[in-house]
Image: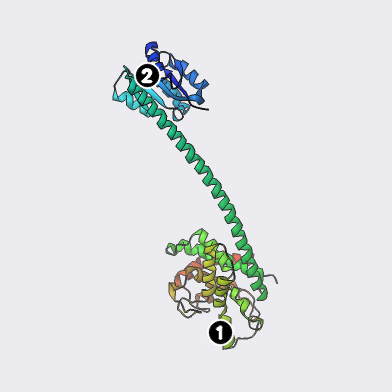
């Protein structure tokens, strides 16, 4: 509905007629001799009123009583009000502005001034309302776009998870390991990561990053696809040449992730590449393939390195039986499987009971 009407609250008939004549040519006019009549007209014609001119001194309901009534109903944010007054008190003006009056018109009227004040107020208020509507529409559009993006992200994440699970299952099936191994590595990684996040904020780990590391950890051994079965499944001790070939699964895994795996999530891709290549690096620099030392090894690779050792020790392999959790824990602390960061070992100690619970929950079938 077009706002083409001016509502005038004015008990003095002469003053009311002056205002009517000023705006009759441009607007429809509604006249009220007191506040009560004006409120009735306002309610009946709400959608068409462009502005209201409100006399301060009126019978039945004066100007501020009208404002108090309308303020409770939040009308003053939808229709601009100009107060008419013969006073020049700063306190009166302050009170009016606090209620939401947009301007004041003083008696006796100066026709040009009154018209300019009214037209300026109408123009400003219409612009304000249009701007608010535009912002509201933009917010709705943004919410819709965000909803679409969330749905697309959810679909992409689902695709990533299916791809990672599928590739990991191929590796574990070929290695004669159960699918529980994948779950354990993922759960151990997030569990140890939470401990590191709590104890050492300098690593800037977050819950979101831990989820990404968890998914990426499932691909840590993907390079073993390129290692011959005779070596992967050999029950006896490997020769030096065979061990060198086994070690190459780190670089081969990184190459497979870089050139053959299409992960839509860049963060998971980066973690997966790093973990596949560096999960056999050791804190003292005696690991492989790059001989990284200390915190040259990313915290993600350090976490997966430790949990991979723990899972290998507590799981049955073609070349060994499983160790009990306590024994595996002590072997890791004593450096049996290489050196780990003191910080990582402290975080590991904090979650020892949680690891034992996860081991029981995802135990391999006999």
Q: What element carries label 1?
A: helix
Question: How far separated are the C-alphas under marks 1 and 2?
Answer: 95 Å
What residue sits 51% from the left and 64% below the top? 193
Q: In this view, does 72 lie to the left or right of 173?
A: left
Q: Residue furthest right?
A: 366
What residue sits 60% from the left and 67% below the top? 184
Residue 127 is situated, as x and y percent measured from the top left of the image, at 43, 34
Residue 290 in view in this figure: yes
Q: Residue furthest front?
A: 25
Front residue of this view, candidates 118 and 170? 118
Q: Is residue 213 left or right of residue 96?
A: right
Whether 294 is drawn above or below 241: the answer is above
Q: In this view, does 284 lie to the left or right of 173?
A: left
Front residue of this view, candidates 159 and 326? 159
Whether 198 is drawn above or below 167: the answer is above
Mark 2 = which residue? 56
Front residue of this view, candidates 19 and 335? 19
What residue sits 43% from the left and 74% below the top? 294
Q: Which residue lies furthest to the top in this view?
A: 13
Mark 1 = which residue? 244
**Label 1 crowd (10 A; few <14 / some 14-19 / many >=20):** few
Residue 353 in view in this figure: no
Q: Is mark 2 on a helix, strand or loop?
A: loop
- Which mark is nearer the camera, 1 or 2? 2
Precedes in sequence: disc 1 or disc 2: 2
Residue 54 is situated, as x and y percent measured from the top left of the image, at 40, 20
């Amino acid at each position: 509905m077009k706002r083409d009407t001016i509502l005038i609250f004015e008990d003095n008939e002469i003053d009311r007629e002056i205002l009517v004549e000023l705006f009759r040519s441009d607007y429809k006019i509604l006249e009220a001799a007191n506040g009560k009549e004006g409120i009735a007209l306002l309610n009946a014609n709400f959608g068409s009123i462009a502005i209201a001119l409100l006399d301060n001194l009126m019978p039945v309901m004066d100007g501020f009583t009208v404002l108090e009534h309308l303020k409770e109903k939040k009308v003053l944010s939808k229709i601009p009000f100009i107060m008419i007054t013969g006073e020049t008190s700063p306190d009166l003006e302050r009170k009016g502005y606090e209620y939401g009056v947009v301007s004041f018109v003083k008696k006796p009227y100066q026709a040009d001034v009154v018209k300019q004040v009214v037209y300026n107020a109408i123009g400003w208020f219409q612009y304000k309302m249009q701007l608010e509507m535009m912002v509201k529409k933009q917010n709705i559009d943004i919410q819709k776009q965000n909803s679409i993006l969330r749905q697309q992200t959810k679909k992409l994440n689902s695709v990533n998870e299916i791809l990672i699970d599928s590739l990991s299952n191929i590796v574990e099936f070929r290695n004669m390991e159960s699918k529980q191994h994948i779950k354990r590595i993922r759960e151990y990684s997030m569990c140890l990561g939470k401990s590191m996040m709590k104890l050492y904020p300098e690593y800037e780990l977050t819950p979101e990053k831990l989820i990404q590391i968890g998914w990426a950890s499932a691909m840590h051994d993907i390079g073993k696809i390129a290692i011959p079965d005779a070596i992967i499944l050999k029950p006896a001790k490997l020769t030096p040449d065979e061990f060198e070939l086994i070690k190459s699964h780190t670089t081969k895994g990184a190459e497979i992730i870089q050139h053959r795996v299409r992960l839509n999530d860049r963060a998971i891709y980066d973690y997966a590449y790093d973990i596949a290549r560096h999960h056999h690096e050791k804190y003292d620099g005696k690991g492989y393939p790059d001989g990284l030392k200390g915190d040259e090894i990313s915290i993600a690779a350090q976490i997966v390195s430790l949990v991979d050792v723990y899972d290998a020790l507590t799981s049955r392999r073609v070349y060994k039986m499983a160790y009990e959790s306590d024994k595996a824990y002590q072997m890791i602390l004593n450096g049996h499987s290489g050196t780990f960061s003191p910080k990582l070992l402290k975080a590991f100690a904090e979650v020892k009971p949680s690891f034992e619970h996860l081991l029981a929950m995802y135990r391999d079938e006999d």
